[in-house]
Image: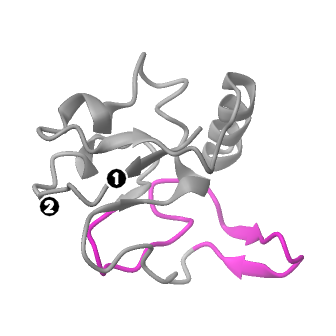
């Protein structure tokens, strides 16, 4: 499952540079599929395509946030999610809305990084 940042976040930013997929963004900041990945274009669930460098709406305007579709829980990079390991207030927790197996997380990593 993806990791999420709860509203207990103190906006310290410790998590952001730790993410190997660039899935963590400051509140209010637009994100891209291409940032930190090898993606050029992404086909969305509705069948439409988007340029990977096209800015996307922020998931949160108040707190740092994690884009679930880019989060691999650091699978294939580290033994544990690095955002959770460095968070001083333990607000990086598993997101129950995005449960994935280790195999699915490895497939996502391969897709994101062109492996």
Identified at 54% across, 77% down, the residue is: 53
Q: Which range of residues does the magenta coloring cover?
A: 25-52
Nearest to the observer: residue 60 or residue 26? 60
Is residue 41 one of those drawn in magenta? yes
Instruction: Note whether 90 is above or below 85 in the view shown.
Output: below
Spatial separation of the CA atoms under disc 2 and disc 1: 10 Å
Quick one: label 1, few (<14), some, or many (20+) residues within 10 Å?
Answer: many
* Residue 113 x/y as whole percent: 61, 44
Identified at 56% across, 66% down, the residue is: 33
Q: Which residue is mark 2?
A: 11
What is the residue that sits farthest to the right in this orientation?
47
Quick one: label 2, few (<14), some, or many (20+) residues within 10 Å?
Answer: some
* Residue 32 x/y as whole percent: 50, 72
Q: Which residue is mark 1?
A: 5
- Predominant SS along the magenta part: loop
Identified at 20% across, 56% down, the residue is: 9
Residue 115 seen in render: no
Instruction: Note whether 50 is above or below 37 in the view shown.
Output: below
In the displayed structure, does residue 64 sit left or right of residue 81? left
Instruction: Identify the secondary structure beneath mark 2.
Output: loop
Figure quadrant of residue 12 = bottom left
Quarter holding the N terminus is: top right
Is residue 61 one of those drawn in magenta? no
Identified at 49% across, 34% down, the residue is: 73
Instruction: Identify the secondary structure beneath mark 1.
Output: strand
Mark before the other along the chain sequence, 2 or 1:
1
The numbered dot on residue 111 is none
* Residue 34 x/y as whole percent: 54, 65
Quarter holding the C terminus is: top right
State if disc 1 and disc 2 touch (CB < 8 Å).
no
Nearest to the observer: residue 86 or residue 94? 94
């Amino acid at each position: 499952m993806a990791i999420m940042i709860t509203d207990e976040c103190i906006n310290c930013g410790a998590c952001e540079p730790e993410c190997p997929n660039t899935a963590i963004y400051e509140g209010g900041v637009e994100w891209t599929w291409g940032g930190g990945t090898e993606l050029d274009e992404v086909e969305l669930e509705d069948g439409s395509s988007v340029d990977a460098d096209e800015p996307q709406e922020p998931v949160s305007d108040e707190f740092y946030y994690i884009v679930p579709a880019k989060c691999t829980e650091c699978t294939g990079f580290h033994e544990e999610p690095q955002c959770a390991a460095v968070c001083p207030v333990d607000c990086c927790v598993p997101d129950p809305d995005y449960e994935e197996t280790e195999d699915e997380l490895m497939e996502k990593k391969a897709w994101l990084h062109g492996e």
